[in-house]
């Protein structure tokens, strides 16, 4: 999952500090103004600039984060991400995040997204290998650990996130045409439905995986929708997957559809 990380000078409206508590001042390197300058060349919409400027001046309060996310994640007019992690510091080595999918909906957690935030925090703090970061998500608290980093040339950091023990449950989902699809419900804080296939096209009963994924994602068996993964065993040490991601769609994404010109 590709994500953009947006820092707010103040915690979000859903997580406000005690009255009178001073907000942490963002650094110049990764402040909202720096983010605005970086994507301004890509985002030409005046309404987009107004939204980002509002974030810069006053944090997340009053900002429609779902609408902002949809605009930022747009493949042709934004940065083209699969989601935005909105972040606020809560302590010296801790923070609070909320993940919005590309369609603006809220996701409980993303393991990769949480590690992206932790890597950014580590760079901000100058954290050394062995350091830990505490991140509060909508799926609960997660502890991330910096394993290694490289500062020569491009800054890179290796981070692991403690996602907890996953839960598993066998499940059969019946599609509209009566096709019964066997799979496994998996959760590490957010929902997944994993289907094992035996063909290189990842088809399920000759139906394209994208079509099956789209229907299962929105199936009534999953009131909050679900991510759908199609897994194929390639060898004893290798598997291949396709993902229909909740709030995003198929992965990898198709090229953006170009706007149609009105008839002359």
Image (tube, rainbow, N blue to C red):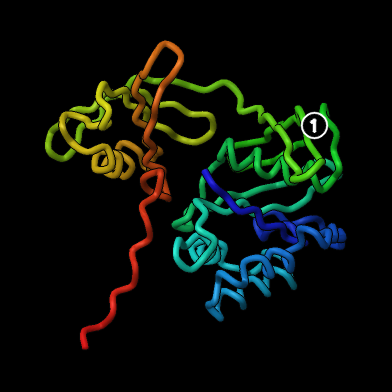
Is residue 196 shown left or right of residue 102? left
Residue 57, above or below 218: below
Occupied quadrant, residue 189 = top right
Asked whether residue 91 is in view, the answer is yes
Residue 24, above or below 141: below
Q: Which residue is mark 1?
A: 132
Q: Residue placed at 27% from the left, 31% from the top?
A: 202
Measured from the top left, where is residue 149 in percent x and y? 78, 34
Is residue 53 shown left or right of residue 122? left
Q: Residue placed at 67% from the left, 64% from the top?
A: 60
Measured from the top left, where is residue 18 in percent x and y? 81, 56
Asked whether residue 23 is in view, the answer is no
Give the farthest residue toward the left: 177
Is residue 232 shown left or right of residue 5? left
Give the farthest residue toward the top: 236
Give the farthest residue toward the bottom: 264
- Packing grade of label 1 (10 A; few <14, some 14-19, many >=20) is many
Helix, strand or loop under label 1: strand
The quarter of the picture where the C terminus appears is: bottom left
Residue 211, above or below 187: below
User: Viewer-proximal residue, 196 or 215?
Assistant: 196
User: Viewer-proximal residue, 245 or 44?
Assistant: 44
Q: Residue placed at 61% from the left, 53% from the top?
A: 4
Residue 169, above or below 66: above
């Amino acid at each position: 999952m590709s994500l953009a990380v947006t820092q707010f000078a103040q915690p979000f409206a859903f997580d406000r500090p005690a009255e009178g508590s001073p907000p942490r001042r963002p650094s110049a390197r990764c402040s909202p103004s720096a983010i605005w300058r970086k994507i301004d060349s890509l985002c030409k919409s005046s309404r987009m600039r107004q939204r980002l400027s509002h974030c810069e001046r006053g944090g997340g309060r009053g900002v429609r984060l779902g609408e902002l996310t949809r605009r930022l994640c747009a493949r042709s007019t934004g940065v083209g991400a699969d989601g935005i992690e909105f972040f606020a510091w809560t302590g010296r080595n801790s923070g609070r995040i909320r993940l919005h999918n590309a369609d603006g909906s809220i996701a409980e957690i993303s393991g990769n997204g949480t590690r992206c935030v932790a890597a950014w925090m580590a760079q901000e703090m100058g954290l050394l290998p062995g350091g830990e970061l505490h991140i509060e998500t909508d799926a609960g608290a997660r502890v991330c650990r910096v394993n290694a980093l490289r500062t020569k040339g491009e800054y890179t950091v290796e981070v692991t996130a403690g996602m907890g023990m996953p839960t598993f449950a066998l499940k059969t989902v019946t599609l509209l045409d009566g096709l019964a699809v066997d799979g496994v419900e998996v959760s590490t804080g957010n929902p997944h439905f994993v289907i094992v296939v035996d063909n290189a096209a990842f088809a399920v009963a000759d139906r394209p995986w994208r079509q099956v994924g789209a229907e299962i994602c929105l199936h009534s068996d999953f009131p909050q929708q679900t991510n759908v993964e199609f897994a194929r065993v390639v060898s004893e040490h290798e598997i291949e997957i396709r993902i229909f991601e909740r709030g995003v769609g198929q992965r990898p994404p198709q090229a953006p559809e170009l706007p149609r010109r009105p008839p002359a």
